[in-house]
Amino acid sequence: MKKFVVLVVFSLFSVGLMQAEDVVYLTTDYFKTYIFDYTKEKEWKYKGDKPCVIDFYTTWCGPCKRLAPIMEELSQLYCEQVTFYKADTEKERELAYIFNISSIPQVLYIPTKGQPMLLKGLYPKEQIVSIIDEFLLGKKTGIK
């Protein structure tokens, strides 16, 4: 009986973990395949079926390190609605060049329709939530 209870508890825990979505580390090739292929298209047309957030960072950047846990937390909170990516600007130089990333952190917010929005700097969690809710999901929050 103990084995059965442990198995059931472990199974329920595993299902819960599979539903939550972690931040995905983005490569240039993945970006071109699943988000937007700037080598073939001239006008922006997002390929995804739900909005996404791309955090451009480097491993040595202090503000990037402070932003990382916020993005991890929000990726869990919005796992059903928004996909979260991280792009290391030192490894993905082509992608950083395409978006003219000259300082970090920078975060690219991509709605399913319309143009993306690129913001420079470290924003408070509440402001990021407001951007996601209003810009990506079309909700009215009233938070600025």
Image (cartoon, grey):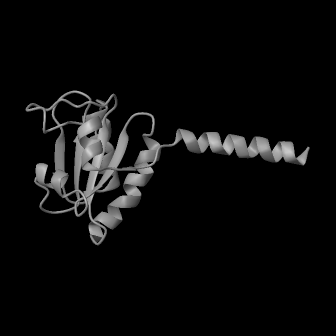
Q: Position of residue 87 (x, y in %)?
A: 28, 54
Q: Residue at x 27, y 65 (%)?
A: 58
Q: Residue at x 29, y 50 (%)?
A: 27
Nearest the eye: 2 or 74? 2
Q: Position of residue 91 (x, y in %)?
A: 25, 61
Q: Eyeballing the image, is 121 above or below 4?
A: below
Nearest the eye: 108 or 87? 87
Q: Eyeballing the image, is 3 above or below 33?
A: below
> Can see residue 143?
no
Horizontal relation, residue 142 to residue 2: left or right: left
Nearest the eye: 11 or 65? 11
Quadrant of the image occupied by residue 80: top left
Quadrant of the image occupied by residue 48: top left
Q: Position of residue 101 (x, y in %)?
A: 14, 56
Q: Position of residue 59 (x, y in %)?
A: 31, 68
Q: Residue at x 64, y 44 (%)?
A: 14
> Can see residue 22?
yes
- Number of labels in the image equals 0
Q: Residue at x 23, y 56 (%)?
A: 92
Quadrant containing the N terminus is top right
State the residue lying farthest toward the right.
1
